[in-house]
Amino acid sequence: MDKQKLEFLNAKSDEIRKILIEMIGRLGVGHVGGSLSAVDLLTVLYYDLAKVDPKNPKDPDRDRIVMSKGHAGPALYAALASKGYFPMEEIKTLNQAGTNLPSHCDMNKTVGVDMTAGSLGQGISAAVGMALAGKMDKKDYRVYAIIGDGESQEGQVWEAIMLAGNKRLNNLTIFLDNNKMQIDDYVDNINSVEPFDKKCEAFNMQAIRVNGHDKEALENAILQAHKTTDKCTCIVMDTIKGYGVPWAVSKGVGSHSFSISEKEWREFCNKEND
Amino acid sequence: MQDIKELREIYCDSLLQMAETNKNIVVIEADLTNCIKTGRFKAAYPDRFINVGIAEANMIGVCAGLATCGKVPFCSSFAPFATRRCYDQIFISVAYSKQNVKIVGTDPGITAELNGGTHMPFEDMGIMRNIPNMVCIEPTDASMLKSLMPQIAAYNGPVYLRIMRKKCEQIYGDGAEFDMFKAFTLRQGSDLTIFASGIMVSRALEAADKLKSEGIYAEVINVYTWKPIDEETIVKSVAKTGACVVAENHNVHNGLFGAVSEVLAQNCPVPAESVSVKDQFGEVGKIPYLEEKFALRSNDIYDAAIKVLKRKK
Ligand SMILES: Cc1ncc(C[n+]2csc(CCOP(=O)(O)OP(=O)(O)O)c2C)c(N)n1
Ligand SMILES: [Mg+2]
């Protein structure tokens, strides 16, 4: 990745993080940690590799992006808002009565959201369905699904991975946001999902492990998935919950959902007043 | 009012108390320990506590297996994930297999607030009520939960418990006693009966106050156990009042209105009105917005009462 592109993508991920923190900050509370850990991937997808067009969000030939860990809706909304899928003003309505931006992703409410999620484990199956439909229709769109490491304790995740592996869905890329934490504790202290890459390989998939905040590594891994013709790819992204916002990272497991003060978000966003 | 405990505190207090004498009580969670706050149980009895991770279907199956070995598992999650997400496991491994598992679903109906539609259960009691032998209870407040917990633990069979996690309005005094198989008559009346459950009980009392100020006397009955339902109390009341309103934080289909109507249609048909969610999905919002949106306010109970009185000959 050339320097110019990297700088552009870094500027975009900074912007998305600011939108995200302002959005949750204005409401006062929300799923901060798991939203932040997915931002670098969303930046690479929306600003680099995914074939999507904010002006044509229902294009049947578009790439699909499924946020299976639906509580990270705010990260997706921030990316969509920065891309211009809907007016930036709307971010002020997160979780307010009658909003188009509910806490969990809703394909019928938010322009640009490809699948409803919130009950963990379900989005990835829908992504498999989208990839199968692409094969049936001989279309060349790609499907990207983002799952959580805690989410991967759901049996359904493995049902989906087994099918994707066996059907050799090379048009589907699954991203594990491996931030090592869930609500109660570290994932390893509860019920480890590792070695995730080895498990995927055993399920007839290609697995690539990367630093999920290294955009160049992410790009390379995705390009490798594109090149692979006979396998579905899982990209295990080692990430840090809350990445990019020091006071979120320092909360550790507590970064999952917490309150943000007006002072905190305004400082982070360099927004003294409206 | 200030020193009322959160329902989850009562829940864990009771578990701890019972666990002392009943070695078989075990607690199983699915990554919402920090929400139901059973961490104190984990600390006191680390070898009788299991966090299975985010795997509700597995949680239910594991509980069933534990129960076959004589354990009395109490497991929990947000109500949709404790019921809908693992329905067949509950049906087959727990109920059909006659296993003694206690399932706790939290954040009922509009109390799910900002978690929105995916997390807002208006159907949990309905689907659980449809499983043979499943006892379905929605305790009204902290005092009631405290009184019912030992009975639920002592009862040999599957129980679904629908509770708010946090503080809820106190209806009953500290130390009040309840029978898990009976309804509780909160107020005597002669003109109509209001059956209510959960957060609708305080709203029903408010509506009854307003009706009383207009010379209409409503009997208010708290039906906290939806199944098996206390037929005797229900029939006796409507035989006297001749009309009823049923108020629930739940979908109209297969909920408390359905349960009460089944009893009335067979035993004592009278005009009945329903205050409930009308076949809709939930959405994000705070309670004041949601109770208006879904018409679950005390005024809605009042209006339903006026309507049913017009139908009463
Ligand atoms: C089926 C289901 N069970 C429980 C929950 C509650 N819940 C929401 S987020 C979460 C933890 C998710 O952990 P992880 O997948 O690792 O997400 P991240 O760390 O990226 O936020 C839980 C248990 C849910 N949304 N769906
Ligand atoms: Mg995680």
Image (cartoon, coloured by chain):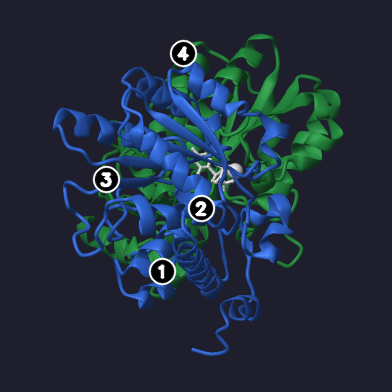
Image location (x, y in percent) of residue B52:
64, 28
* Colour of chain B in the image: green
Which mark identifies residue A215? 2
**First of labels 4, 3 by sequence position:** 4
Mark 4 belongs to chain: B
Residue drawn where x is 69% and y is 64% of the image:
A246
**First of labels 3, 1 by sequence position:** 3
Mark 4: C-beta under 8 Å from nearest atom of ligand 1: no
Q: Mark 3 to mark 1: distance in Å?
A: 32 Å
**First of labels 1, 4 by sequence position:** 4
Which mark identifies residue B270? 3
Closer to viewer: mark 2 or mark 3:
2
Ligand number 1: quarter of image: top right
Report which residue position mark 4 lands on: B96
Q: Mark 2 to mark 4: distance in Å?
A: 52 Å
Determine the image quadrant of residue A168.
top left
* Colour of chain A in the image: blue
Label 2: few (<14), some or many (≥20) within 10 Å?
many
Mark 1 belongs to chain: B
Q: Disc 2 marks which amino acid?
A: Lys
